[in-house]
């Protein structure tokens, strides 16, 4: 079965992935109104953040033919509401492990009441046969983290809500097959938009969000011949456009736009798989194989 963008999706939610790659990334939504994604491996699913209601999370999972019974763990990247507002209700019917960085559960009463296993940013753990490596990011919260997932030679890098890419980010996001990286705003749109100056300054600061230009500048150092999928994340609906992010990323890597809209781009490579660039949205769940 194919989704609207041509990606193959399993129609058997209880079955382990049969694609030659061990890991898949399912993005239920990415943006200021809610964030949730799932990494799928042969042993189950790991949920990244819980920024939607349980009902909405299940609706989006089922749209991608995902079975909630296969979720083995929930990992929280940081405590902002658009990443955790659904966690307490989700966990009422969830028997998997809960993971958050040191002190993060204590920042919200609803999180503090849950049995989180806390890790220091830079720590790692294994869930469902997937090695999860955490690394510090830069955001206006206590201990924000990005994540790298490795399983049987396959890998996914995941980082949003960071004003800059830290040395750890650059190390662990490099040479992954799927890279999901924040590309929050276009600076010109932000500076000429409706946001008050103090909020603009917060977004642009080192503890804010990555711009299209910042993400694009980092890509040549992160992408290797192993990298096959790039996903622009946490795109502002007010201060950005998916096509602006895709165009900036494509230009940085010499990729060709797939259509006049600039919604996707491809870099054909001799001796290596093609590299595909696309943007995640707030309202439409997608699967990256």
Image: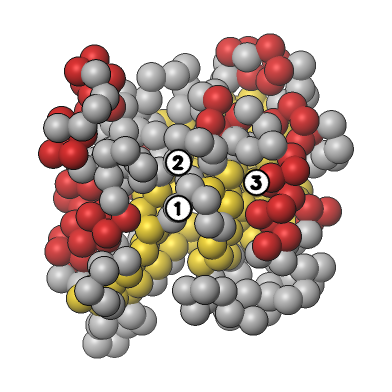
In the image, residue 128 above or below residue 74 = below
Residue 98 at x, y = what percent?
Answer: 71, 34
Question: Which residue is labeled 2 in the image?
Answer: 31
Contact between marks 2 and 1 (CB within 8 A): the answer is yes
Secondary structure of residue under mark 3: strand
Secondary structure of residue under mark 1: loop
Q: Earlier in the sequence, mark 3 or mark 1?
A: 3
Q: Looking at the figure, which quarter contains the N terminus?
A: bottom right
Task: State the separation of the CA atoms marked 3 and 2.
Answer: 16 Å
In the image, residue 273 above or below residue 81 = below
Task: Give the residue drawn at x 16%, y 61%.
Answer: 252
The label on residue 281 is 1
Contact between marks 3 and 2 (CB within 8 A): the answer is no
Task: Give the residue drawn at x 40%, y 43%.
Answer: 234
Asked whether 209 or 192 is in front, the reply is 192
Q: Earlier in the sequence, mark 3 or mark 2?
A: 2
Of badges 3 and 2, the one in the foreground is 2
Task: Give the residue drawn at x 74%, y 40%.
Answer: 54
Q: Judge from the rendering whether residue 201 lies leftward or rightward of residue 147; answer left or right.
A: left
Q: Earlier in the sequence, mark 2 or mark 1?
A: 2
Question: Which residue is labeled 3 in the image?
Answer: 47
Residue 224 visible in rendering: no
Q: Judge from the rendering whether residue 24 lies leftward or rightward of residue 265; answer left or right.
A: right
Contact between marks 3 and 1 (CB within 8 A): the answer is no
Task: State the separation of the CA atoms marked 2 and 1.
Answer: 7 Å
Residue 278 at x, y = what percent?
Answer: 36, 64
In the image, residue 48 above or below residue 118 = below
Residue 263 visible in rendering: yes
Residue 178 at x, y = what percent?
Answer: 44, 62
Asked whether 276 or 4 is in front, the reply is 4
Task: State the separation of the CA atoms marked 3 and 1.
Answer: 17 Å
């Amino acid at each position: 079965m194919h989704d609207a963008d041509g990606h193959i999706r399993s129609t058997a939610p209880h079955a382990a992935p049969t694609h030659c790659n061990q890991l898949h990334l399912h993005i239920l939504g990415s943006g200021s109104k809610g964030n949730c994604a799932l990494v799928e491996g042969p042993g189950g699913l790991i949920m990244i953040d819980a920024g939607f209601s349980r009902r909405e999370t299940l609706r989006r999972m089922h749209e991608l033919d995902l079975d909630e019974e296969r979720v083995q763990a929930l990992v929280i990247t940081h405590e902002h509401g658009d990443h955790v507002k659904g966690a307490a209700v989700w966990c009422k019917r969830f028997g998997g492990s809960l993971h958050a960085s040191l002190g993060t559960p204590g920042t919200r009463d609803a999180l503090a009441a849950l049995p989180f296993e806390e890790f220091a940013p830079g720590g790692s753990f294994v869930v469902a046969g997937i090695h999860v490596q955490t690394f510090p990011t830069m955001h206006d919260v206590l201990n924000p983290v990005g994540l790298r997932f490795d399983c049987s030679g396959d890998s996914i890098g995941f980082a949003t809500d960071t004003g800059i890419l830290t040395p750890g980010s650059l190390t662990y996001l490099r040479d992954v097959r799927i890279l999901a990286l924040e590309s929050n705003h276009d600076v010109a749109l932000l500076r000429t938009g409706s946001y008050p100056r103090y909020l603009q300054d917060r977004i642009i600061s080192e503890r804010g969000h990555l711009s299209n230009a910042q993400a694009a500048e980092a890509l040549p150092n992160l992408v290797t011949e192993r990298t096959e999928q790039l996903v622009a994340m946490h795109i502002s609906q007010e201060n950005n456009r998916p096509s602006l992010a895709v165009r900036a990323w494509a230009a940085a890597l010499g990729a060709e736009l797939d259509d006049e809209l600039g919604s996707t781009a491809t870099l054909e490579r001799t001796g290596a798989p093609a590299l595909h660039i696309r943007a995640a949205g707030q309202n439409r769940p997608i699967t990256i194989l």
